[in-house]
Amino acid sequence: MFFALVFLAEFIAVLRKEGPVQVYRLAEAACLFVIAAIFGLRVFYIHFPYVEWLFGIAALLLALLYLHKMISRYRYYSEKNRSMALLVLLFHSSIILFLVSLFLLPFAAKTSELCGIAAFVLLVVFLSVALLKKELPVEGENMSAFGMVRGLKDHSVIIISLFVLFSFYVGLNRIGMLPGIYSDEFPRAYFELVDKASSGKEKKLDGRYPYEDFKDSYDRFLEHQQQRDAKK
């Protein structure tokens, strides 16, 4: 939730700044706030109606925003150095595919996974080429790909960092080296049902997910137990 508060503070700061409204910065901060906040709630398995749609819309808008950035930056660097322009495409394509992966996660888990893998491959290719071609001439000065990334005035590095951490966590969790994140409020079976619903493996039956029925039954069980304890 820390990141969510940071993005919210940035959104407010940009909104209160004098001069013309910076629409793209506002949209980026707002989308990142929504995504970070929902991720934070997800850790504690807090769910509310239409959260998947809200999460997906924020991720999709952010992907479109970075598509716009990629096109404008590619045009800028293509006039100065073709190789640097291609590195811009690789870097931004990785971010866009990651965001598309987040957008698809609640609706098409398999496609989301493929997009995530493609994003990771593009990032590895970008890093490999950036290490091999350490400096490229841009407007008479040598510039590295990492220097280009550092010069971007947005949240590209933060998104890529979160993407790498998320990818490593998912990978290590799947091979059993890291446990899932659970709380003590409900039994683990409840969280497993929530995971299946979030990943698209479980579909709604009569307008409800299985974990919602499980929670209702568990709440009734706790209420019954409390009534029994009160009578003793």
Image: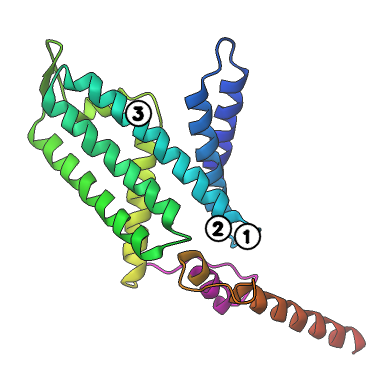
Q: Residue at x 18, y 27 (%)?
A: 85
Q: Residue 42 got which mark?
A: 2
Quarter of the view holding residue 147:
top left
Instruction: Answer above or below: position of 73 versus 67.
Output: above
Nearest to viewer (mark 1 / mark 3): 3
Which residue is the extreme one toward the front?
206
Q: Which residues are magenta?
A: 178-195
Q: Residue 46 got which mark?
A: 1
Q: Where does the C terminus fall, quadrant-wise?
A: bottom right
The amino acid beneath tag 2 is Arg
Nearest to viewer (mark 3 / mark 2): 3
Viewer can see residue 74: yes
The amino acid beneath tag 1 is Ile
The amino acid beneath tag 3 is Lys
Q: Would you say the residues marked 2 and 1 are in contact, meaning their CB atoms lie under 8 Å apart?
A: yes
Q: Tell me which numbered mark, 3 or 2, is placed earlier along the sequence.
A: 2
Q: Which residue has dot 3 on it?
A: 69
How far, Cα to Cα, is label 1 from label 3? 33 Å
Q: Residue 84 got which mark?
A: none
Quarter of the view holding residue 144:
top left
